[in-house]
Amino acid sequence: MGTATPLIDRVNSPKPWYVHRWPWLLMMGPFLVVIAASYTGWIAFTRQDAMVVDDYYKQGNAINQDLRRDAAATNLGLSLKASYDVANGKLNGKLLSFSQPITGKIVIRLAHATQPEKDIQLQAQVSQGGDFSAALPALDMGRWGVTVENEKREWRLTGTWKWPQQRVVDLKADLQPAD
């Protein structure tokens, strides 16, 4: 007969490394990092970088122009208070300059926070008393970016409006007056 290995020697003999679970658990971390880095690299090389634009200088000048329009609104002391009349489908309000009415045509832009296809642009004529009214279709509940400017784009008021939590949109020029 052959020689048999005693049972005690088989139990106490060391097992190969791949039989234990700890080496596999320790190797899983670096393996997952390699997979994640590969995926991130793939995203970086296959997607366009939306932050880089060809006409960065022109866009920078446009930002400066917008800041000048904000400063012009501050120098005029502009403020606007408007409310949405749901029953009549109208946005009614008052535009004042240093508490005095301002007249002329204005453009009101309502930008939906997440869905640009829902953006709305209104035009209104401001009366001698500073009052205006513009037809406004049914407004979705949510956060709206509001921009008001005159027809010649000389000044601009901006702010946010949370409809229907805020029944009134109240915009004031808040930059420091230019010296």
Image (spheres, rainbow, N blue to C red):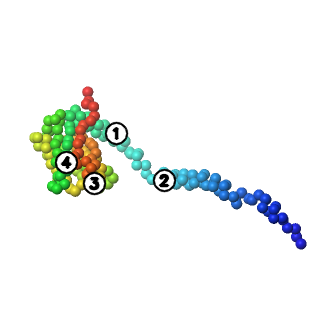
Q: Earlier in the sequence, mark 3 or mark 1?
A: 1
Q: CA distance from mark 4 to mark 1?
A: 34 Å
Q: Which residue reaches farthest right?
A: 1
**Does residue 117 show up?**
yes
At x 26%, y 42%, the residue is: 158
**Does residue 154 show up?**
no
Q: Which residue is mark 1?
A: 60
Q: Quadrant of the C terminus?
A: top left
At x 89%, y 72%, the residue is: 1
Q: Amino acid at mark 4?
A: Ser
Q: Which residue is mark 3?
A: 141
Q: Which residue is mark 4?
A: 83
Q: Position of residue 39 (x, y in %)?
A: 52, 54
Looking at the image, is mark 4 or mark 1 nearer the viewer? 4
Q: CA distance from mark 4 to mark 2?
A: 45 Å
Q: Position of residue 83 (x, y in %)?
A: 19, 48
Task: Tell which of 87 and 134 is nearer to you.
Answer: 87
Report crowding for label 3: few under 14, some 14 to 19, many 20 or more residues within 10 A (C-alpha): few
At x 85%, y 67%, the residue is: 4
Q: Secondary structure at mark 3?
A: loop
Number of labels in the image equals 4
Q: Position of residue 99 (x, y in %)?
A: 16, 35
- Tell me where residue 31 sits by quadrant: bottom right
Looking at the image, is mark 3 or mark 1 nearer the viewer? 3
Q: Secondary structure at mark 1?
A: helix
Q: Which residue is mark 2?
A: 43
Circles 3, 4 touching at the beta carbon (< 8 Å): no
- Tell me where residue 174 sits by quadrant: top left
